[in-house]
Image (cartoon, rainbow, N blue to C red):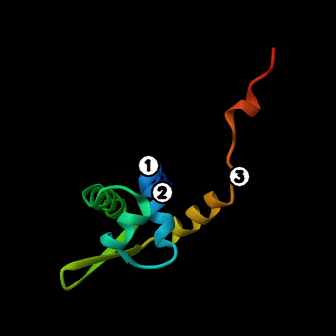
Amino acid sequence: MNEDLRILKAISDETRLKIVKLLLSGEKCVSEITPLIGKSQSNISIQLSHLKNAGVVESRRQGKKAYYSLSSEKAIKMINALSEIPEINAADFVEEV
């Protein structure tokens, strides 16, 4: 159960969730992720560090670049499951008076 909570906490940030969804399609370096997310390179690096510390992603170095990929099969399954849940509009739950 602790692993589930650790993964959910790591992906609860919108930017980190976007990064993880990008990594579902394969390994990427920060310079590939940055334009797709629309955040600064330093912000992406910080978010990747959080994901790495949580055990969701792993990295490998090739020259000066670090390439990131998903490291947890459980995280991959959780992301895929979350992607299938339709978005809920809070207004749908408010009673009209």
Image coordinates for residue 47, horizontal then vertical, percent? 33, 56
Q: Earlier in the sequence, mark 3 or mark 2?
A: 2
Is disc 1 surrounded by few (<14), some (14 to 19) or many (20+) residues within 10 Å?
A: few
Q: What residue is shown with label 1?
A: 13
Q: Nearer the viewer, residue 54 or 11?
A: 11
The residue that appears at 74% across and 25% down in the rendered structure is 94
The residue that appears at 48% across and 68% down in the rendered structure is 22
Residue 88 as seen in the image, left or right of residue 27: right
Residue lying farthest to the right in this orientation: 97
Could you tell me if the residues under marks 2 and 1 are in contact, i.e. CB atoms within 8 Å?
Answer: yes
| Kind of element beneath mark 1 | loop
| Gap in angstroms between the C-alphas marked 2 and 1 | 6 Å
Question: Can residue 11 be seen in this snapshot?
Answer: yes
Question: Can residue 6 be seen in this snapshot?
Answer: no
Quarter of the image for residue 55 reads: bottom left
Which numbered tag is attached to residue 56?
none
Q: What residue is shown with label 2?
A: 17
Q: Nearer the viewer, residue 51 or 22?
A: 22
Is disc 3 surrounded by few (<14), some (14 to 19) or many (20+) residues within 10 Å?
A: few
| Gap in angstroms between the C-alphas marked 1 and 3 | 18 Å
Residue lying farthest to the top in this orientation: 97
Q: What residue is shown with label 3?
A: 86
Could you tell me if the residues under marks 3 and 2 are in contact, i.e. CB atoms within 8 Å?
Answer: no
The residue that appears at 46% across and 50% down in the rendered structure is 14
Q: Earlier in the sequence, mark 1 or mark 3?
A: 1
| Gap in angstroms between the C-alphas marked 3 and 2 | 16 Å
| Kind of element beneath mark 3 | loop
Hey, what amino acid is under mark 3?
A: Pro
